[in-house]
Image (spheres, rainbow, N blue to C red):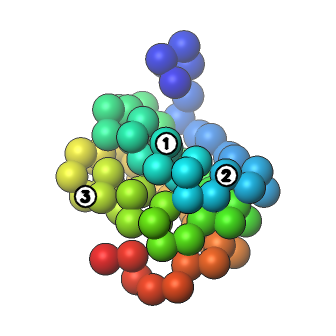
C-alpha cells in the first residue's frame, strides 16, 4: 500500500486469503491512514483472522469506515 498512496477502496472478495492473509492485512491496517473500505467477503477467514483485524482496528486504525466479512466461517464474536 506504500506504492498506492490514494487507494481508499480495496476489494479482495473471493481470494481465499484465510486467517494468514487477514493477519497480514491487520498488520497493514495498523499503519494505513488512507484505506476507507475493505471487502474481505468469501475468503475463508475464521476467528483468528477476525480477531487480528478487530485488534488492529481497535488499537491503531481510525480511518477504515467499512469492513465486509460476510460469508466467512466466523464461529464467535472475535472478541
Tell me whether the residue at label 1 lies in contact with that at label 3, contact meaning CB atoms closer than 8 angstroms: no
At horizontal 69% and vertical 47% (from top left) the residue drawn is 12
> Disc 2 designates what residue?
17
Q: Secondary structure at mark 3?
A: helix
At horizontal 32% and vertical 51% (from top left) the residue drawn is 56
Q: Secondary structure at mark 1?
A: helix
- Dot 1 or dot 3: first in sequence order is 1
Which residue is farthest top? 3
Tell me whether the residue at label 1 lies in contact with that at label 2, contact meaning CB atoms closer than 8 angstroms: yes
Q: Which mark is residue 58?
A: 3
Tell me whether the residue at label 2 lies in contact with that at label 3, contact meaning CB atoms closer than 8 angstroms: no
The residue closer to the viewer here, 17 or 14, is 17
Q: Is residue 48 left or right of residue 31?
A: right
- Dot 2 or dot 3: first in sequence order is 2
Distance from disc 1 to disc 3, alpha carbons, whole Å, reads: 16 Å
> Disc 1 designates what residue?
24
Query: Can residue 32 be spotted in the picture?
Result: yes
Q: Secondary structure at mark 2?
A: loop
- Dot 1 or dot 2: first in sequence order is 2
Amino acid at each position: 500500500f506504500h506504492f498506492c498512496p490514494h487507494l481508499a477502496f480495496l476489494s479482495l472478495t473471493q481470494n481465499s486469503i484465510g486467517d494468514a492473509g487477514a493477519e497480514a492485512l491487520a498488520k497493514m491496517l495498523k499503519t494505513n491512514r488512507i484505506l476507507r473500505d475493505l471487502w474481505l467477503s468469501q475468503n475463508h477467514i475464521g476467528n483468528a483472522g477476525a480477531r487480528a483485524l478487530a485488534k488492529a482496528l481497535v488499537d491503531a486504525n481510525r480511518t477504515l469506515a467499512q469492513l465486509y466479512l460476510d460469508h466467512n466461517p466466523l464461529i464467535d464474536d472475535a472478541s
